[in-house]
Image (spheres, rainbow, N blue to C red):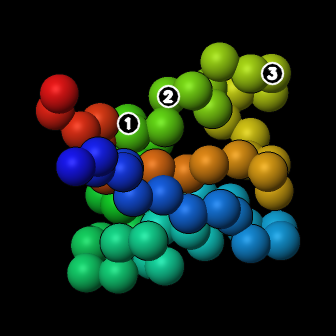
């Protein structure tokens, strides 16, 4: 059975601080932002680094073990 890594797409105008409470509601926002960023390093390979586009996939958990 194939596991799928949980993800979301940003809503219009969302940045990291807007996505964090929606994605990780039980976590402190600053900690959640840092956690999300660590799981989404692919978004930091672009210029400007870390900018979120509406078409992006935002992972909500670390890479699955495999």
Give the left or right position of residue 41, taking residue 1 as reference. right
| Residue identified by numbered label 3 | 47
Residue 3, given in percent of the width and then of the height, sits at 28, 49
Q: Are marks 1 and 3 in contact (CB under 8 Å)?
A: no
Residue 38's disc is: 1
User: Would you place residue 49 above or below residue 10 in this image?
Assistant: above
Specify which label sits upstream in the sequence, 1 or 3.
1
Q: Is mark 2 on a helix, strand or loop?
A: helix
Q: Do the residues labelled 1 and 2 touch (CB within 8 Å)?
A: yes
User: Would you place residue 1 above or below residue 8 in this image?
Assistant: above
User: Would you place residue 44 above or below residue 24 in this image?
Assistant: above
Residue 29, given in percent of the width and then of the height, sits at 39, 69
Q: Do the residues labelled 2 and 3 touch (CB within 8 Å)?
A: no
Q: How crowded is mark 2: few (under 14 residues within 10 Å), some or many (20 or more)?
A: some
Residue at 44% across / 71% down in the picture? 23
Residue at 35% across / 81% down in the picture? 25
């Amino acid at each position: 059975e194939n596991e799928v890594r949980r993800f979301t797409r940003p809503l219009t105008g969302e940045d990291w601080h807007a996505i964090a409470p929606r994605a990780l509601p039980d976590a402190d926002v600053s900690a959640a932002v840092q956690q999300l960023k660590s799981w989404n390093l692919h978004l930091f390979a672009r210029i400007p680094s870390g900018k979120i586009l509406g078409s992006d996939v935002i992972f909500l958990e670390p890479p699955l073990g495999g």
